[in-house]
Image (tube, rainbow, N blue to C red):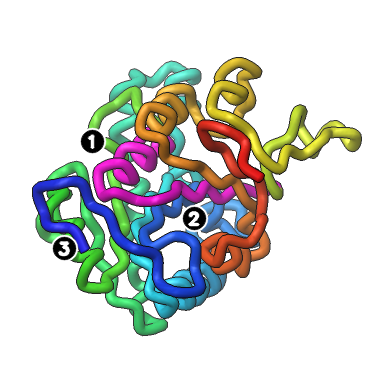
């Protein structure tokens, strides 16, 4: 295990591929069957899968979005100041993080919520050394409030936190089973990629993560796995190293 104050690394437990992961959940993932807000039942399902991964000895950080409650960019398009909209969106991620924490603790998973915006009554301030120590003690961390700065997406926050805590992979949960050459919801002939390089995403402008997040992962050689969360068991499958979704890395692997 690593010591706080230097790059965090960990050996993967026997039988799994990754020893420390960062799971990126969109706010929409928490909707479940609802049109707005948080579906407690779907949160429970996610929590159980995260608990299974933790039971394998994997250390887990989670970044959650806020699009199920508020989306700053959409509000900006309707005339709201962009920075104001982004700050409201950050607060939405805090609400989602607390809901997910409740679901995790109800299935017996010790969890800490760490926020990039100080709010001591509801969450711990984000401190990298403390985050690493929580992981080493087997606690799941939910990172909320993005980076604490407007104009950055929660994808960028996920990439940043993953690099900071020394995660071995960034898992991007979506509503489709990987990255396609076009929108599979509108094009039945869309082709799914099994593997991609970071440069492919940037060059072809594949709308998986924003360019800042992809660039940060590329600079730090952090692989990304894009997978389908509608089958929550995929979280465990990815941790075990099964070929799920699309692997994005610095070079194609055999």
Q: Which residue has dot 3 on it?
A: 133
Q: Nearer the viewer, residue 219 or 83?
A: 219
First of labels 3, 1 by sequence position: 3
Q: Is residue 127 above or below residue 229?
A: above
Q: Which residues are magenta?
A: 154-176
Secondary structure at badge 2 equals: loop
Of marks 2 and 1, the one in the foreground: 1
In percent of width and height, residue 226 lies at 59, 45
Residue 47 showing in the rendered view = no
Q: Which residue has dot 1 on it?
A: 148
Q: Nearer the viewer, residue 190 or 147?
A: 190
> How many C-alpha atoms fall within 10 Å of the one at disc 3: few (<14), some, or many (≥20)?
some
Q: CA distance from mark 2 to mark 3?
A: 32 Å
Of marks 2 and 3, the one in the foreground: 3
Secondary structure at badge 3 equals: helix
Q: Which residue has dot 2 on it?
A: 37
Q: CA distance from mark 3 to mark 1?
A: 21 Å
Quadrant in the picture for residue 130? bottom left
Residue depicted at x 50% and y 50%: 171
Q: Nearer the viewer, residue 6 or 180?
A: 6
Would residue 53 appear left or right of 174 to someone viewing this image? left
């Amino acid at each position: 295990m690593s010591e706080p104050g230097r790059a965090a690394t960990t050996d993967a437990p026997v039988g799994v591929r990754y020893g420390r992961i960062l799971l990126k959940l969109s706010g929409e993932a928490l909707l479940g069957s609802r049109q707005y807000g948080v579906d407690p039942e779907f949160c429970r399902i996610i929590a159980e899968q995260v608990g299974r991964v933790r039971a394998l000895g994997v250390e887990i950080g989670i970044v959650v979005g806020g699009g199920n409650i508020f989306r700053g960019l959409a509000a900006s398009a309707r005339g709201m100041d962009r920075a104001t909209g982004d700050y409201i969106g950050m607060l939405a991620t805090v609400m989602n993080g607390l809901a997910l924490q409740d679901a995790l603790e109800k299935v017996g998973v010790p969890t800490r919520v760490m926020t990039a915006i100080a709010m001591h009554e509801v969450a711990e301030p984000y401190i990298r050394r403390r985050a690493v120590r929580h992981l080493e003690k087997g606690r799941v961390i939910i990172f909320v409030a993005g980076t604490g700065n407007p104009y950055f997406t929660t994808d960028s926050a996920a990439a940043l936190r993953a690099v900071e805590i020394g995660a071995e992979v960034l898992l991007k949960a979506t509503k489709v089973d990987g990255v396609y050459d076009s929108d599979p919801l509108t094009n039945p002939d869309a082709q799914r990629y099994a593997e991609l390089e970071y440069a492919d995403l940037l060059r072809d402008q594949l709308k998986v993560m924003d360019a800042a997040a992809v660039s940060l992962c590329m600079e730090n050689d952090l692989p990304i796995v894009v997978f389908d969360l509608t089958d929550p068991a995929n979280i465990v499958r990815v941790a075990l190293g099964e070929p799920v979704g699309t692997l994005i890395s610095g070079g194609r692997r055999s």
